[in-house]
Image: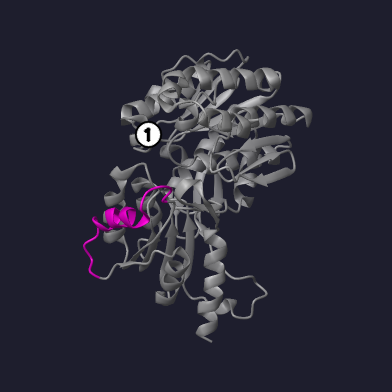
């Protein structure tokens, strides 16, 4: 259905479509809800919004709910699932078309899932993809500049996020719950809305805590918890999920068990190693990381996790035709944090990929940076440069399944798979 509507939309003159766009998107949202008989009314829906951490919070929340014995559905950038059936999200959209989302919720109801956890984006909100989804709870993670050119300003971007919270404010559900990061500058705006229950969280809720390059220890509700995740930003993600679980009266022991058994998410601070059966696996004496980091703030936070390691960094920019403002800034951050920088192609769409990379390069002053447009070759060269105790960090795509080119062409891709393949070649060459 969504594909058919996309084809019909292409037949409408662009100027006319821009005028009709709000009505078009609202009508589709209503039609999708009508066709699937408003399934969100019959399941507990938890929305997750913010700039960073949304996918991680969805997965952490899901892990806790599953550990508590609930059947769940979820939708995020990486995957979607209904009970035990899970699928990779290959739509290149966190929130696919309205018919898809409503269909997923209907199937979740049919499978007798008690909870659905849905990642909600500003782009989705602008197209009314959150409309007619009756939320019970919303988790707000944080806000930083993103999609500025698309929305027109930071304030409009923020307001798009707030429109999701206002949908919760108008929800007819028995309980409406706002979980918000009080340490974020925008957290107060979300907590000031008229919802029935408010649960702020912040880093103080985890004290005392310790974070190393490999794991973290923290305290929540008087219980000491170990997590196999890295970075202070992930501690915030965990706190968001734990605070939501607290609102659902889930015991601290269930929370602790779920967090301590959580192994991470593909494409989010993902450690790349060879299969344990590979005889050359023990030759890897450096770390390889694949991460989705696609904003200046998230890039800096990934680099900070490895602040005591010499870093070799592979990056591009987040795509052609948007967010040009951050390209130079991402180059500047890599320049300051990385011993060696390799710039490469990412998702140019209809823009000249070399122009994108050159804008990133304008923020780099070190004379040793390289431009290698072939992304596989760039990853290979970074791995070849790695020495004992170094960290190779490959950012920008995470689990994105394609490199997007001109006229919406798609090149099947996986940073993790390519990094693993090239790592095997590099280690073999050193035997």
- 176 is higher (above) or lower (below) than 346: above
Q: Residue 287: where, in percent of width, then height? A: 47, 68
Residue 309 appears in the rendering = no
Name the residue at 47% across, 46% down: 407
Q: Is residue 349 magenta?
A: yes
Residue 120 in picture, x, y percent from top left = 52, 32
Give residue 173's quadrant in the image.
top right
Figure quadrant of residue 355: bottom left
| Range shown magenta | 348-367
Q: Residue furthest bottom?
A: 431
Q: Residue at x 60, y 22 (%)?
A: 133
370, above or below 406, in the image: below
| Image position, residue 368 (x, y; %) | 27, 71
Q: Is residue 3 left or right of residue 50?
A: right
Mark 1 lies on residue = 150
The answer to whether residue 275 is above or below residue 34 is below
Would residue 402 be visible to someone looking at this image?
yes
Front one among 305 and 366:
366
> In which quadrant of the rendered image does the N terminus lie?
top right
| Residue at disc 1, secondary structure | helix
Residue 310 belongs to magenta span: no
Where residue 160 sits in the image (x, y, percent)?
Answer: 42, 26
Q: Classify mark 1: residues with Cα within 10 Å, few (<14), some (14-19) or many (20+).
A: few
Instruction: Identify the image's colour scheme: rainbow, by chain, secondary structure or one colour.
Output: one colour
The one of 5 and 412 positioned closer to us in this rendering: 5
- Which of 133 and 184 lies nearest the eye of the viewer? 133
Q: Residue at x 45, y 23 (%)?
A: 17
- Report which quarter residue 366 is drawn in: bottom left
238 relative position to 298: left or right: right
Q: How many marks?
A: 1
């Amino acid at each position: 259905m969504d594909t058919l509507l996309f084809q019909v939309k292409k037949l409408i003159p662009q100027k006319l479509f821009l005028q009709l766009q709000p009505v078009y998107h609202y009508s589709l949202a209503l039609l999708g809800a009508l066709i699937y008989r408003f399934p969100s009314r019959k399941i507990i829906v938890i929305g997750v919004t913010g700039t960073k951490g949304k996918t991680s919070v969805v997965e952490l929340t899901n892990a806790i709910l599953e550990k508590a014995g609930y059947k769940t559905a979820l939708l995020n950038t990486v995957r979607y699932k209904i009970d035990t059936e899970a699928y990779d999200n290959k739509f290149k959209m966190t929130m696919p078309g309205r018919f898809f989302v409503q269909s997923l919720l209907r199937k979740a109801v049919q499978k007798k899932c008690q909870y659905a956890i849905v990642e909600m984006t500003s782009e989705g909100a602008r197209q009314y993809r959150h409309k007619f989804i009756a939320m019970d709870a919303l988790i707000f993670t944080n806000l930083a500049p993103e999609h500025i050119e698309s929305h027109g300003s930071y304030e409009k971007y923020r307001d798009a996020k707030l429109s999701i919270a206002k949908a919760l404010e108008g929800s007819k559900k028995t309980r409406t719950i706002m979980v918000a990061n009080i340490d974020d500058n925008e957290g107060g705006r979300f907590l000031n809305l008229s919802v029935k229950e408010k649960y702020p969280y912040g880093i103080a809720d985890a004290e005392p805590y310790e974070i190393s390059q490999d794991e973290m220890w923290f305290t929540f509700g008087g219980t000491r918890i170990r997590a196999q995740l890295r970075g202070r930003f992930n501690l915030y993600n965990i706190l968001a999920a734990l605070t939501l679980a607290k609102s659902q009266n889930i015991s601290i022991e269930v929370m602790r068990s779920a967090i301590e058994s959580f192994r991470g998410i593909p494409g989010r601070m993902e450690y790349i190693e060879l299969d344990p059966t590979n005889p050359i696996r023990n030759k890897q004496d450096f770390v390889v990381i694949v991460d989705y980091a696609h904003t200046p703030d998230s890039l800096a936070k990934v680099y900070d996790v490895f602040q005591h390691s010499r870093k070799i960094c592979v990056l591009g920019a987040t795509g052609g035709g948007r967010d040009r403002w951050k390209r130079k800034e991402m180059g500047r951050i890599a320049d300051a944090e990385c011993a060696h920088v390799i710039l490469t192609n990412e998702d140019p769409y209809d823009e000249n990929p070399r122009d994108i990379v050159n804008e990133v390069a304008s923020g780099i002053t070190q004379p040793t940076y390289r431009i290698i447009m072939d992304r596989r070759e760039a990853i290979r060269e970074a791995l070849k440069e790695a020495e004992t105790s170094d960290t190779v960090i490959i950012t920008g795509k995470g689990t994105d399944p394609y490199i997007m080119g001109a006229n919406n062409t798609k090149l099947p891709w996986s940073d993790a798979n390519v990094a693993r393949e090239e790592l095997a070649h590099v280690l073999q060459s050193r035997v």
